Image: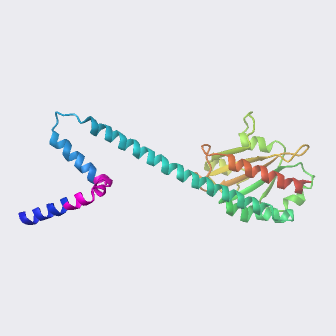
Amino acid sequence: MDQNLAALDATLRDRIISDPDALLDDAEVMAALVAANERAMGTNIVDLRGIAMERLEARLDRLEDTHRSVIAAAYENLAGTNQIHRAILKLLEPAQFEVFLRDLGTEVAQILRVDELRLVLEAEEGDGTAALARLGDVLSLQPAGFIADYVNHGRAIPLRQVTLRQIGPDAVAQSPLWSGRTAIRSEVCLLLDFGPDTAAGLLVMGSEDPHLFSPQQGTDLLGFFAGVFERAMRRWLA
């Protein structure tokens, strides 16, 4: 048995001598050798080089984690950009307002991966509201002042173009936009500017995923989508 062990040791020795880089590139083997060296030195000796190496390894691990996070964020941002571009192209296809609204509630909503979508317009009774109301559930006609109250919950603060938030079941049950859809748990409100002498609009997208929209998320892509959407709407309002 000792002879086999000696032969094995000789074989390992020859392999290490012939290819030392393989040993140096193996982090687990090097860690085991460093630990063995520390044990051999005893507890009365402080290995400053070993401490420095440990700190460098910890820093390298943090850098690698950051690198992976940056790459993941870049891929996510690219995927989000492609998603918004596809939705915009779909918005620009219809030649009729009825088709525009139908696509908004179906294919555009599917591209954006939202469960519900509402286009809110403030309109007084008699302004053709009866005809507009027949265009489907996507279009929601509301009295003047509704948009500011819905976005800000009655607070006297400036309206933001993009508002992301999570919503509870009580708020959903009381919402005139999500009646019958009590599973909605997060939403984004996109304020729409249709030009001078035109009432503002609001595009609201709701999701059953409570984490799809949250205040911590970026708003650049959604702001861009809102800008394109309001320009597409102006031709119908004209």
Asked whether residue 16 is drawn in magenta, I would say yes
Front residue of 95/168: it is 95
Q: State the image quarter where residue 19 is shown.
A: bottom left
Q: Quadrant of the C terminus?
A: bottom right
Identified at 61% across, 48% down, the residue is: 168
State the image coordinates of residue 226 (x, y, percent, origin top left). 76, 50
Most foreground residue, 58 or 10: 10
Q: Residue at x 20, y 61 (%)?
A: 14
* Image coords of residue 62 (percent x, y): 43, 44
Front residue of this view, candidates 50 and 14: 14
Residues rendered magenta in the picture: 14-28
Magenta stretch, main secondary structure, is helix
Q: Which residue is rendered at x = 57% and y = 55% of the image?
A: 75
User: How many numbered callouts?
Assistant: 0
108 relative to 218 in the view: left or right: right
Residue 174 visible in the current orientation: no
Quarter placement of the N terminus: bottom left
Q: Using the image, determine if residue 40 lies above or below residue 74.
A: above
For residue 86, above or below residue 77: below
Q: Which residue is drawn at 91% across and 43% down?
A: 197
Colouring rule applied to residues: rainbow
Q: Does the magenta stretch include residue 108?
A: no
* 2 versus 224 height, above or below: below
Picture quadrant of residue 101: bottom right
Q: Where is residue 90 in the image (x, y as percent from the top left)?
A: 76, 63
